[in-house]
Every structure is written in C-alpha cells, then in structure tokens.
C-alpha cells in the first residue's frame, strides 16, 4: 500500500515533468500556464502544486531532467574510446554519434529555451552548465587523458583538447540552429561531413609525431 | 534645409535604435514598451512609429544594427592575416582580438537575445546568421585560402578550417556565457589561454608538414 502510494506519486511527478516540458517548449516560460500543464498531465492543479511549489520550480525540474541526456552522451564517449584498438575509426564513430545526439530537434529546442531563460534564472543555467555541458566535456577529457597515457594522443590539457574536439564539431551546426530557430535543418550528410572533418583535424593536432 | 531635415531624421532614427537596444536588452522583447523607448530616445511615440511600423520592426532594426560589429570583426581578420610575415604571431594576435571582441558583455547579451527570439522571429534570426555569423566565417575562410595559396597553411576546405578555428576558440567561453547568463565572467587571462591553445592546435592541424 505504502509502496503503491510512492509508485503513484513518482509516476505523477514524471507525468507532470513531461507535460511541463511539452508546454514550455511549445509556449515558452511566460505563456505556459500551470492549468494547461495539469490538464496535459491529466492531474489536478492541486497535484501539480503538491509536487512543485510554483512555475519556476517546475521549469527548473524540466531543465534539470535533461541532464539525463548527458548520461547518454557520457556513455557514448566511454563506449567509443575506452580500450579502442583503432583510434581513427572509433573517434570518427564518436564524432558521428555525438553530433547526432546533440542535434536532435528536442535537444536543440531545450538548449535554446535554457539560453533564453539564463537572464532570468541564472542559478538554473549555472547548474545546467555544470551538470550538463561541463560533465560531458569532463567525460571526454578523461577518455583523452587515458588515450594520452596509452601513447595514442599527445595531450597536456585534456579539458582543452575535449573543448577543441566538441567546438570544431558543433560550432556551425549548433549556432545555425540556435540563431535561425531551425531545429531540423542539418541533414545527416552535413553532420557526417562535420564529424569527419573534426576527426581529421583533431588527430592532426593531437596525434603524437611519428 | 532639405539636408538638415534628412540629418535630423537620420539622427532620430539612430537615437531610437539606441534607446530600443538598451530597452530590449534590459527588459526583453515582451516587456519592452514603445512608450518607454520613445521616452528614452527623447522623441514622441508618433516619431517612433514614423520610423518603425511596430515593435517587431524596431526589434529587427536593433538586431541587424549589430552586423556593424561584424564589420569590425572582418577588419580584425584581414588586418591580422593579410600579408603576414609571422603566421604564428599574427594568428595568435587574431585569436586574442577575436575572442576579446566576441566576449564583450553587450555582444554576449545581444547574442542571447537573438537566440531567445529565434523561435518567434526565425526570418530575423536567419538574416542575422547569414549577415553576421556566416560573414565573419567567410572573411576568415578567405584569409585562410590566401595563406594556403602562399603555402603557409594546407587547407582544402577554408570554411571548414575557419569553423574549426572559431569553434575551438569560443566553444567554452560562449557557451558558459549563454547558459549561465554571466556576461562578464571570463577574465582576460582565461580568454588568452583559449587564444593560445587554439593557435597551437590550429597550426598543428593545418600547417604543412615540413
């Protein structure tokens, strides 16, 4: 009975966050209403307020729920690079899967929404930056550090090298999406072109001289 | 008389755009009012509407006025690289001046505002992307092309190389500012560190093998 109650509460919590995500994405923070979110989540407005003190708290929960996407990114990185026997091939595969994950329309739309709210909710943006952006970079830096110890790369500052890899990979596609609002714009071929150019430039910069 | 009239009109136009820039930056698009902008520009509301049909047209004028910043960026690039006799030194100086120009608090704040409005005004964002973002990249690509013709760099796709240079340089500092809302955060030393790391990695990737 107790367990059922907890399960039901957790399920409602999840339903509310999902409904809020859809509503904030469709309407923005200001135009989203708690009534609408309750209705979409199929719960009462009282239930929404039992889980979240106000709209801002719910918005924070939506933004921070995206750090789950970062778990996926981290596993892409470690899966691709740990113990690699063919660095060029596996770095190329990582570049492909990384750019594909980051360029999902929903991920881009959330990214724009977090940036748009940074003026108003700087603490939330700062938390996301640390738990999302920096955590992905740190995972890549760890992987590069290990490759450096194996003698496959020559890197003195692994975080900087991770920043270079991701910056080369995403600068055009992410900025294009952020500025134009076109979250479906870059085709697979274009993303693959960025992935292979990044892999080649990164290895040219960071592979030990023979 | 005719000329005076034109001069006065142009001056008022400029005053209105300046007042609108300050107001949009302080309050965002939704909360900025034409009354407030008129008052800050020291003109009547009728005068504002004689120059701009509505708030959206004024917002577009504000965003597109920032393409003047891009003229400055383009002249930094050509000034640093055209006819260089010491590529490492001059690329390093360009990296310094480029990151300094892009990381100005006002430029970062405007960037966040353009991104925040991209959902609502995709045409405006697309115009800014072409006239701002892509124009700066194209100027850098031209300079790299010339350096490649002089045998100082070995580049088959100059736009991609320009993208790599700027992406490595700005990925962390720009994203940090966009997400956290902290437009004054990165100190000079931190920016200089990014500039020198980018210069080293770029030359390692794109300098011809000896």
Image: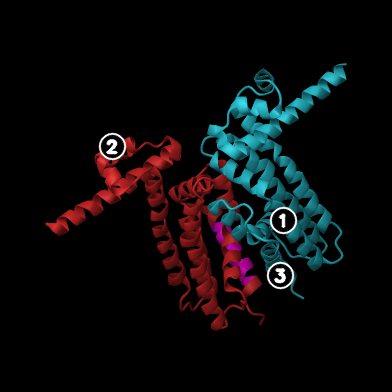
Chain colours: A red, B cyan
Above or below residue B108? Residue B49 is above
In the image, is residue A55 above or below residue B182? above
User: Label 2's element?
Assistant: helix
Q: Which mark is residue B100?
A: 1
The single residue placed furthest to the left in the displayed view is A1
Split into 4 quadrants, where in the image is the N terminus of chain B?
top right
The majority secondary structure of the magenta stretch comes to helix
Closest to the observer: B4 or B37? B37
Label 3: few (<14), some (14–19) or many (≥20) C-alpha neighbours in 10 Å: some
At 43% from the left and 48% from the top, the residue drawn is A106
- Left or right of B26, for residue A30: left
Numbered label attached to residue A39: 2
| Mark 3 or 2: the one toward you | 2
The chain letter for the residue carrying disc 2 is A
Nearer the observer: mark 3 or 1; the answer is 1
Q: CA distance from mark 3 to mark 2?
A: 55 Å
| Marked residue chain, label 1 | B
């Amino acid at each position: 009975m107790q367990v059922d109650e907890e399960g039901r509460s957790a399920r409602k919590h999840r339903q509310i966050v999902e409904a809020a995500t859809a509503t904030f994405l469709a309407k923005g923070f200001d135009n989203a209403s708690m009534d609408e979110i309750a209705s979409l989540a199929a719960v009462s407005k009282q239930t929404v307020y039992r889980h979240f003190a106000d709209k801002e708290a719910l918005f924070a929960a939506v933004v921070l729920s995206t750090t789950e996407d970062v778990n996926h990114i981290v596993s892409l990185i470690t899966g691709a690079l740990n113990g690699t026997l063919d660095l060029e091939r596996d770095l190329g595969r990582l570049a492909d899967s990384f750019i594909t994950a980051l360029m999902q329309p929903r991920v881009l739309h959330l990214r724009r929404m977090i940036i748009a709210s940074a003026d108003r909710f700087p603490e939330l943006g700062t938390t996301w930056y640390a738990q999302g952006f920096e955590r992905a970079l740190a995972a890549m830096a760890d992987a590069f550090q290990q490759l450096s110890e194996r003698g496959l790369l020559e890197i003195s500052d692994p975080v900087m090298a991770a920043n270079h890899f991701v910056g080369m990979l995403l600068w055009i596609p992410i900025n294009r999406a952020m500025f134009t609002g076109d979250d479906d714009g870059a085709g697979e071929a274009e993303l693959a072109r960025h992935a292979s150019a990044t892999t080649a430039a990164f290895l040219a910069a960071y592979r030990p001289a023979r």
